């Protein structure tokens, strides 16, 4: 789905639209996503270092940057609605700036994931099945899947809504692939690297889509 930016900004032009309970509800989900991602991300970074898993470490860095990204999206969503009332060039630029900051946060997660993946390709070793890493990755799948469910059940056509739904869809798939690679491959470090490359590629794609505002 691709709607023009102008159409999405003007869809909320009716008086009182900024108080729309569905829109407030989306912002509360984005606020929850911010707290959940930063909390779980910090846990994943520590668990990744402790268990020696590059996929878990990279996913932790990704989650922390996602938390910042979702905070920016929540602010963007509020600004989008204010823009329909205020309609100034300044408000429009403010939205675009926050969306670019969100994209930069996603890109930072992609660079961290990519660095970890390359590092482990260079220093590959045989390893036992990494049960702690697998448990943490399954937790990431559950968290992202839950956030996807929460966001998908909001009937909101704003740019922030489209970005959030796309973001959690991709994150759920990426963390699922990382968990499967840890589960299926006894050479955990090598499997981790594959998960890291996939995560870095998907995060880079998300950053591009967030910045350019396309489905
Ligand atoms: Zn993400």
Image: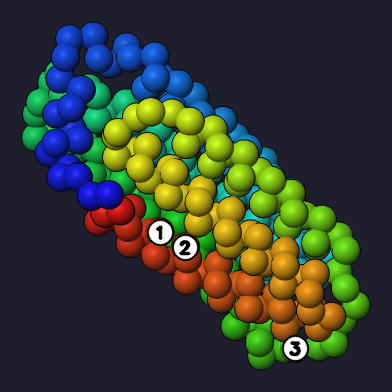
- Regarding mark 2 in the picture, which secondary structure is present there? helix
Residue plotted at (19% across, 45% down): 3
Residue plotted at (55% across, 37% down): 149
Counting from the top left corner in percent of width and height, residue 167 is at: 46, 50
Res. 212 visible in picture: yes
Q: How is the image coloured?
A: rainbow
Residue plotted at (30% across, 33% down): 157
Check residue 206 in the rendering and tell me which mark sits there, or answer none. 1
Counting from the top left corner in percent of width and height, residue 176 is at: 66, 60
The residue tagged 3 is 124
Q: Residues within 10 Å of mark 2 (few under 14, many from 20)?
A: many
Disc 3 to disc 1: CB gap under 8 Å? no
Q: CA distance from mark 3 to mark 2?
A: 24 Å
Q: Is residue 1 left or right of 147 when viewed as pictured?
A: left
Check residue 203 in the rendering and tell me which mark sits there, or answer none. 2
Task: Give the residue furthest to the right.
Answer: 128
Q: Is mark 1 within 8 Å of ligand 1?
A: yes
Disc 3 to disc 2: CB gap under 8 Å? no
Res. 112 visible in picture: no
Q: CA distance from mark 1 to mark 2?
A: 5 Å
Q: Is residue 77 above or below residue 122?
A: above
Q: Is mark 2 within 8 Å of ligand 1?
A: yes
């Amino acid at each position: 789905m691709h709607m023009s930016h102008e159409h999405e900004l003007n869809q909320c032009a009716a008086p009182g639209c900024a108080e729309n309970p569905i829109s407030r509800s989306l912002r509360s989900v984005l606020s929850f996503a911010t707290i959940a991602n930063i909390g779980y991300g910090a846990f994943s970074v520590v668990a990744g270092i402790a268990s020696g898993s590059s996929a878990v470490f990279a996913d932790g860095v990704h989650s922390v940057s996602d938390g910042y990204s979702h905070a920016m999206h929540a602010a963007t969503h509020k600004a989008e609605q204010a823009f329909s009332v205020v309609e100034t060039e300044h408000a429009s630029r403010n939205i675009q700036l926050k969306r670019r900051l969100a994209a930069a946060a996603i890109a930072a997660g992609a660079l961290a994931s990519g660095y970890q993946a390359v590092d482990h390709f260079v220093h590959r070793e045989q390893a036992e099945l990494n049960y702690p890493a697998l448990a943490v990755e399954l937790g990431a799948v559950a968290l992202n899947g839950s956030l996807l469910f929460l966001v998908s059940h909001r009937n909101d056509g704003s740019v922030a809504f489209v970005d959030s739904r796309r973001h959690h869809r991709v994150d759920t798939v990426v963390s699922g692939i990382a968990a499967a690679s840890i589960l299926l491959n006894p050479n955990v470090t090598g499997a981790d690297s594959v998960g890291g490359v996939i995560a870095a590629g998907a995060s880079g794609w998300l950053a591009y889509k967030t910045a350019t505002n396309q489905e």
